Image (cartoon, rainbow, N blue to C red):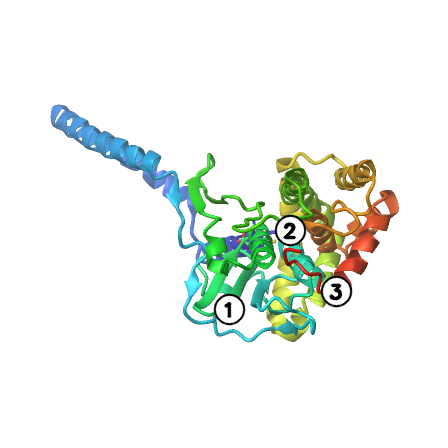
Amino acid sequence: MISLKSIYNFATATALFKQMTRNNVKFKPIMRLMSTEKKVKQSGGLKIGLIGITAGAIGGTGYSIYKLNEARGHIINETMLHPILKDMPKIEPSRRVKYPNDTSGLKLTLFQYQTCPFCCKVRAFLDYHGISYDVVEVDPVLRQSIRWSEYKKVPILVASYDKGYQQINDSSMIISALSSFLIDNQQTLSQVINFYPSVSFIDDDGTKKVEIMNRYFLMFQGTVPANRTPEDMAEERKWRKWADTKLVHSLSPNVYRTPTEALQAFTWFSDVGEWERLFPAWERALIVYVGAFAMWIIGKRLKSRHNLKDDVRISLYEDCDFWVRSLKKKGTTFMGGSEPNLADLAVFGVLNSIEGCDAFQDVLRNTKIKNWYNKMREKVTSHQSHTLNNA
Ligand SMILES: N[C@@H](CCC(=O)N[C@@H](CS)C(=O)NCC(=O)O)C(=O)O
């Protein structure tokens, strides 16, 4: 599931428009008023001219200063992106996932949407390694349960440790930081976080973007695990990035391809996210119906933004086949060899987020991914407390 902020904006814009029409706000008279203002009598031409030049000079200087400052302000060090919280946000978990063999020593709370591909990646990682965690299911439209956070996307992970509560944002960063911490436990979690500085910048389209440096890198202060080589770690990073920047973009246009499919997807999101138990009926109905409608519209825009084929299913099949072909070329069951690595878990997590949608059944029927996917499912759901320690 993709940014439901857009749904919220869409809903707000619709409400605003309705209110304006209800209040009889008329657009034509406003335009007429603007044109009559232009007809101000041209008396005292010289005086007006001088005022104009002065105002222009002041305005121009101000604008130049603003532009210069803006250029300098393009890169901002976001030191507070992963803050240490003094208190745990006071929100009851929606459910607790407990693995009896968990030896990580971590106490984690995951703020998530059950079917967000980025959240599914994090859960695939935690479940595969048998690391226990609490879940707070966030309402994707109102998002009250992450109001305490300046970062407004999910997943957000809060890890409790001796000095407080470490907030970690961004799925890939969460996975890299936890892996690094668990493999090389000479370092504290906060020390690990320092390896992932963030910068923000204003993108060409004027929006603020945040880039987390090194987010696909594992960081070791002590020894590098004996079973890893620089080449296999580079390959793992490459596929993790592919899952985030390529595969994930095929999902929305496929899942929300028609109004019926969009509604079917949201009905499934509601079931697995337990929206009926967690949210009031009106809120659930708002998310399902407004969400399905808005995402059906937005899905079309995403299709052209990410250059998907006219028949969007083909793009999704091609991505899945590309992954399977690469595995075949490697000649191993998983990208990680005989056991999944972070690349397998990322691709699995992304696809797992649409498991209840028609698009996923079509993928199983029309590509060769089923064999790998089912093996991954078995690995992830067996929670065997795979040790991450440096062996
Ligand atoms: N790079 C982030 C992306 C997270 C993301 O975009 N999450 C979506 C949900 S699938 C979200 O929270 N969107 C809300 C918004 O954009 O305001 C990650 O990997 O965690």
Quadrant containing the C terminus in the rendered view: bottom right
User: For the residues marked 1 and 3, what is the alpha-carbon distance in whole angstroms?
Assistant: 23 Å
Q: Say above or below: 52 vs 369.
A: above
Q: Say above or below: 271 vs 219.
A: below
Residue under label 2 = 295
Which residue does the image show at 87% across and 47% down from the upper left?
A: 365
User: Closer to the N terminus: mark 1 or mark 3?
Assistant: 1
User: For the residues marked 1 and 2, what is the alpha-carbon distance in whole angstroms?
Assistant: 36 Å
User: Closer to the N terminus: mark 1 or mark 2?
Assistant: 1
Nearest-to-viewer mark from 1 and 3: 3
Relative image position of residue 327 (x, y in whole percent):
79, 40
Determine crowd level at label 1: few under 14, some 14-19, many 20+ residues with C-alpha closer than 10 A: many
Q: Based on the displayed image, in which of its 4 quarters is residue 308 positioned?
A: top right
Residue under label 1 = 160
Residue under label 3 = 384
Residue 39 can be seen, yes or no: no
Relative image position of residue 3 (x, y in whole percent):
58, 52
Q: For mark 3, give the secondary structure.
A: loop
Nearest-to-viewer mark from 1 and 2: 1
Quadrant containing the N terminus in the rendered view: bottom right
Mark drawn on residue 35: none
